[in-house]
Image (cartoon, helix red, strand yellow):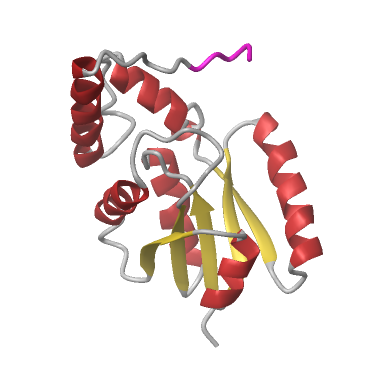
Amino acid sequence: MTHIALYPGTFDPIHFGHMDIAIRAAGIFDELVVAVYDRPAKSVLFTVEERVALARQALANMPNLRVVPYGGLTVEFARRIGARAIVRGLRVISDFELEYQMALTTVQLAPELDFVCLLTRQAHAFLSSSIVKEIALLNGDVSGMVPPHVATALAEKRRERDQNHELVPLVSLRD
């Protein structure tokens, strides 16, 4: 029996913290499906096609891992691909409350699915896609946070936003 796990997220953009969780989960399960959510409630910088392409390139060396877009309920998508578990990463204490609530909801909707949380390595615990985007859009150095192809894509988005005189959405730790 093949044990398939689903690692869902927005991945806008994928960063070293996401990659760490994906690589480690791929080492635990026979197959890992990294699923890029197509219509998150939060605003995104990259299209779903761009996010999938960036993630595929970042994780290309993992033979038992595939990156796909998806929409709708995560548990329904997990069922469609035959997943037995949903994988999530925990960075900080505040993540636990949200992930715990999602795990309980998952069990309510799909009791056959397990919910597996992996702790992010300390080196990546500060990373979030929002912080990476803010730094990149303000012309900061993100080379220690994302693979080179993602840094290049972020620089291109910054140039586009600068040409259109768009504001940079700021992350506030006090919000």
**Residue shown at 31%/52% (left/top)?**
49
Q: Is residue 105 visible in this depiction of the protein?
A: yes
Q: Is residue 173 magenta?
A: yes
Does residue 117 appear left or right of residue 152 in this picture? right
Does residue 132 appear left or right of residue 150 in this picture? right
Query: In this rendering, is residue 6 above or below 131?
Result: below
Q: Is residue 28 or residue 45 the one in the foreground?
A: 45
Looking at the rendering, the stretch of residues picked out in magenta corresponds to 171-175
Residue furthest bottom as drawn? 1
Query: In this rendering, is residue 21 above or below 30?
Result: above
Specify the principal SS of the magenta part: loop
Q: Is residue 108 or residue 32 the one in the foreground?
A: 108
Q: Is residue 141 or residue 12 the one in the foreground?
A: 12
Q: Is residue 154 magenta?
A: no
Q: Quadrant of the N terminus?
A: bottom right
Does residue 159 appear left or right of residue 93 in this picture? left
Residue 165: quadrant of the picture: top left
Residue 144: quadrant of the picture: top left
Q: Position of residue 147 (x, y in %)?
A: 25, 39
Query: In this rendering, is residue 94 above or below 77?
Result: above
**Residue shown at 69%/66% (left/top)?**
114
Q: Quadrant of the C terminus?
A: top right
**Residue shown at 36%/13% (left/top)?**
167
Residue furthest front as drawn? 164
Q: Position of residue 120 (x, y in %)?
A: 53, 41
Q: Is residue 127 visible in this depiction of the protein?
A: no
Residue 86: quadrant of the picture: bottom right
Q: Position of residue 53 (x, y in %)?
A: 27, 53
